[in-house]
Structure formats: structure tokens, C-alpha cells
């Protein structure tokens, strides 16, 4: 079950929701057909609950929104990119564990 804390965004919303947001933001670039993307979905939802108020987490379907993934050189999914103050802090690719994602988030929160 998807968390109500994780918002789906489009290319047109990327700047306002991610780059100009008040909180650091973790963007999950994914696609519905991607098995590893589905595998980390529950972890993403857990993190959204745990970091509520400290971190914004959004998902972007790369099939429906090709411009932003292209801009950031996304070649494989899932790729998660962490942004803070409108700048890319770090990124991680693949179905990684919660500990790795927590470590990534720690760079901005």
C-alpha cells in the first residue's frame, strides 16, 4: 500500500516540489514495470513516515516524465536522488536496503 506521504510528481512540478521546496527532498525515479522499483516501495513508504516533517519524498514515473530523468542522466531505475536547497546532494541506484537509504538521507537531514 502506498503511503499518503509519498507524492507522485511530473516534469512540470519538479522545480516547485523538489528544487524550491522547504524541505530536503528524496526523488524516487521509477516505472510500474520495474521489479526492483516495486521491491523498494515499502521501504520508501516507511522512510516517508519516519522523516515526516524533515524530508519530502516524491516519486517520478520515468515513462510518463522523460525530461527530468534525462536532465539528471538517469540510465537505470530505481534511482533515488537526494536534493537540498535546490541542489543535488547524492544519488543511489538499485534496490538498496533501508540502511543505505537512511545513510543517504542523513547527508541532508
Image: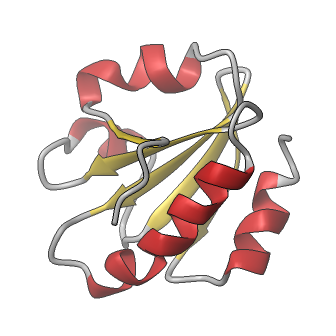
The answer to whether residue 26 is left or right of residue 4 is: right
Q: How is the image coloured?
A: secondary structure
Horizontal and vertical percent position of residue 20: 57, 13
Identity of the residue drawn at 60% across and 51% down = 48
| Quarter of the image where one finds residue 85 | top right
| Quarter of the image where one finds residue 88 | top right
In-front residue for pair 57/86? 57
Looking at the image, residue 105 lies above or below residue 84: below
Horizontal and vertical percent position of residue 19: 56, 21
Looking at the image, residue 58 lies above or below residue 53: below
Callout count: 0
Horizontal and vertical percent position of residue 21: 59, 17
The answer to whether residue 38 is left or right of residue 65 is: right
The quarter in which the N terminus is drawn is bottom left
Horizontal and vertical percent position of residue 35: 28, 86
Identity of the residue drawn at 70% across and 38% down = 55
The quarter in which the C terminus is drawn is top right
Identity of the residue drawn at 17% across and 68% down = 32
The answer to whether residue 47 is left or right of residue 66 is: right
Looking at the image, residue 80 lies above or below residue 16: below
Amino acid at each position: 500500500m502506498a503511503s499518503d506521504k509519498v507524492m507522485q510528481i511530473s516534469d512540470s512540478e519538479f522545480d516547485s516540489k523538489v528544487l524550491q521546496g522547504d524541505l530536503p527532498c528524496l526523488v524516487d525515479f521509477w516505472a510500474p514495470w520495474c521489479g526492483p522499483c516495486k521491491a523498494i516501495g515499502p521501504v520508501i513508504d516507511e522512510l516517508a513516515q519516519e522523516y515526516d516533517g524533515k524530508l519530502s519524498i516524491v516519486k517520478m514515473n520515468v515513462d510518463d516524465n522523460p525530461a527530468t530523468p534525462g536532465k539528471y542522466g538517469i540510465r537505470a531505475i530505481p534511482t533515488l536522488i537526494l536534493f537540498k536547497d535546490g541542489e543535488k546532494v547524492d544519488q543511489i541506484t538499485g534496490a538498496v536496503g533501508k540502511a543505505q537509504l537512511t545513510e543517504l538521507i542523513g547527508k541532508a537531514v
